[in-house]
Amino acid sequence: MKPKNFNMFSLILVLTMLLFISCGKKSDHKGVEFNLKILPETLTDFLYIKMNYQFNLTDKFQGLDDDYRVFVHFWRLNTKEMLLQDDHTPEKSITQWKANESLSYSRVVFIPQFLDEFDIDFEGYEEIKLTVGLYKPAEEENKIILHQEILKVAMASYNAPEKVYDEGWHEPETDPKIKNPEEQTWQWTAKRAVCIIENPGKESLLIIRGGVDKSIFEDQKVIFKINDKILEDFIPKTAKFSRKYIISPEMMGTEDEFKLIIETDKTFIPSDLNKDVKDDRELGIQIFFLYFRENIK
C-alpha cells in the first residue's frame, strides 16, 4: 500500500505542475484574454528582455472602474525571493478599456546578474516564476492573475559575447553605502582603456553608464571608439552620464574580436590633489555599467 500511495501522490504532483505551467500561456479572466511573448526566447541573467503584452477584451468584458494597474513579478523559486518587478500603468488607462477591443504594447526589463556558477547546487540554470496580472494599489491582496509560467534562466556567460578588460583598467571598487545601487560598483579607467569583445556578427546593443568628477574638471571630454573609429565624443553635462548605441556588424568588422576603446582628454592623480590621500593612480572616468548583447527588436 505504501508504494501505491506514493505513486498516486507523485502523479497528482506532476499533473498539478503541468496544469500550473500550461495555464501561463493564455488566460481569460472577466473577459480579458491575455497573451505574452518574451524576446529573446533564450533567457540569461545580465540581459535586457522585451515583453510584448496583448490584451484582447471580449464581449464579456464589463469594464474595470477602479484604478487598476498591471503587475509583473519575477520570483526565484529556490530562495522564494522576488528577483525583479515591473508594475506599471498601460498607456491607455485600464479604466478606459472597452469590450471587443485589443491593446498591445511592449516594455523592456533588465534581468540582473544573480547566478553563481560556483554554488554547489547550481545546475547551469535557475527556474524563476513569472506572474502577470491586474491589481489595485489600495487592495494588493485582491489580484487578478492573468499569466503564470516557469522560466529557465541560464548564466550570461553561456550566451553573451565574451568581454576582456585589457589595458587601462583599474581594479573594481564597491561602496554599499552609496544610495543608488547602480552606482555602488565601478571601475576607473586611465587616460585610455581597452575592452576586447567577442564579435557576434549581429546587430548589438551597447550601453555604457559612467561618471566624471566635475569638481576637478568641468569640461572633461569622453571619447568612445569601436576599432579606433570614433563612436561619439562629448562633454557630459552632469557628473553621471548614460549612453546607448546600436552597433552594426559592419562597425565591428570581420575579425573574431573587436575593440571598444574609452578615452578622455584629462586625467588626475588623487595624491597630487590631496597629500593625505595615498592613491597615485592615474584616473580618467568611472564606468558603472557596460552592457553588450545582441539587440532585441
Image (cartoon, grey):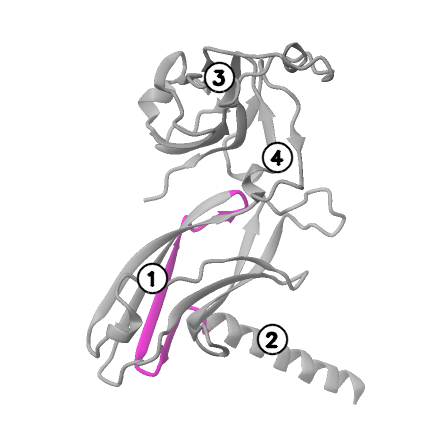
SS at mark 4 in the image: strand
Task: Say which of 75 and 173 sits in front.
Answer: 173
First in residue order: circle 4 vs circle 3: 4
Task: Say which of 74 and 269 sits in front.
Answer: 269
Picture coordinates of residue 176, whole percent (x, y): 67, 41
Q: Which is closer to the viewer, label 3 or label 1?
A: 3
Q: Amino acid at mark 4?
A: Thr
Between the C-alphas of marks 2 and 3, the distance is 63 Å
Above or below, 221 relative to 76 = above
The reply to whether dot 4 and dot 3 touch (C-beta < 8 Å) is no
- Give the residue at mark 1: 53
First in residue order: circle 2 vs circle 3: 2
Q: Amino acid at mark 1?
A: Tyr
Q: Residue furthest right?
A: 2
Between the C-alphas of marks 4 and 1, the distance is 33 Å
Q: Would you say residue 99 sits in the magenta stretch?
A: no
SS at mark 3 in the image: loop
